[in-house]
Image (cartoon, rainbow, N blue to C red):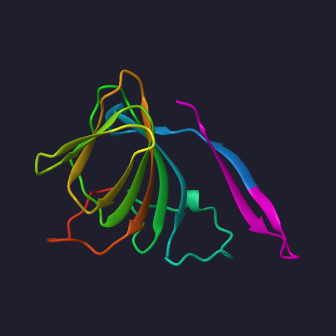
Amino acid sequence: MAGIRRIVTGNNAQGLGVIASDTVFEPQPVTGGIASFAKLWTTDQSPADNTDEFDGALRKTGLTCPGGTVLRFVDFAPGKASPMHKTNSIDYGIVLSGAIELQLDGGVRTRLKPGDVVIQRGTNHAWANMSVGWSRMVFVLIAAEPLGDGTGVTP
């Protein structure tokens, strides 16, 4: 799939808005090629510090950032599914292209189309691409308190 253009704003010495960077990110293969990730931004705290000049895409994180947030695009290969996993976060997942199936460990399967939004609240889940081509979702992951035994996914 195509790269993702990221524009980051900032403020100059006079306090006026400027474009701090304009970059294209190419998703990188993960989990044996069944998906590709492009991490576009993170924060290490919430609320975030808008005076921090650090490029959040460079912050070392796993799937989530404890105490902070992660913005990630995920491209799913045709006919492939992710492993069942959960994270210590609340995730806003938005389908941009393709047909994706959300699978929960309780057996529930829900088919999603472009424009559909999933609010993922610490449940054990997997994603399956039901399309003949690649599918793309964007996720905003916000750190949350662990549920139950506190386990999450490894990075």
The stretch of residues the image draws in magenta is 1-20
Where, by quadrant of the figure, is residue 19 drawn? bottom right
Does the stretch in magenta take in 8?
Answer: yes
How many marks overall? 0
**Whole-percent x and y of residue 1?**
52, 30
Q: Which residue is drawn at 15% across and 71% down?
A: 148
Does the stretch in magenta take in 48?
Answer: no
Q: In this view, does 85 lie above or below 55?
A: above
Where, by quadrant of the figure, is residue 80 drawn? top left
Question: In what quadrant of the picture does the C terminus appear?
Answer: bottom left
Q: Is residue 138 above or below residue 59?
A: above
- Main secondary structure of the magenta stretch: strand
Q: Residue at x 35, y 65 (%)?
A: 90
**Whole-percent x and y of residue 152?**
24, 62
User: Would you say 56 lies left or right of 119 here?
Assistant: right
Q: In this view, does 18 lie above or below 51?
A: above
**Whole-percent x and y of residue 13?**
86, 75
* Nearer to us in this view, 54 or 7: 7
Q: Which residue is drawn at 23% across and 52% down?
A: 85
User: Would you say 36 lies left or right of 7 here?
Assistant: left
Q: Which residue is drawn at 73% across and 49% down?
A: 22
**Whole-percent x and y of residue 42?**
52, 63
User: Would you say 38 lies left or right of 155 here?
Assistant: right
Q: Residue furthest top?
A: 132
Q: In this view, does 45 lie above or below 87?
A: below
Q: Which residue lies furthest to the left in this view?
A: 106
User: Would you say 136 lies left or right of 59 here?
Assistant: left
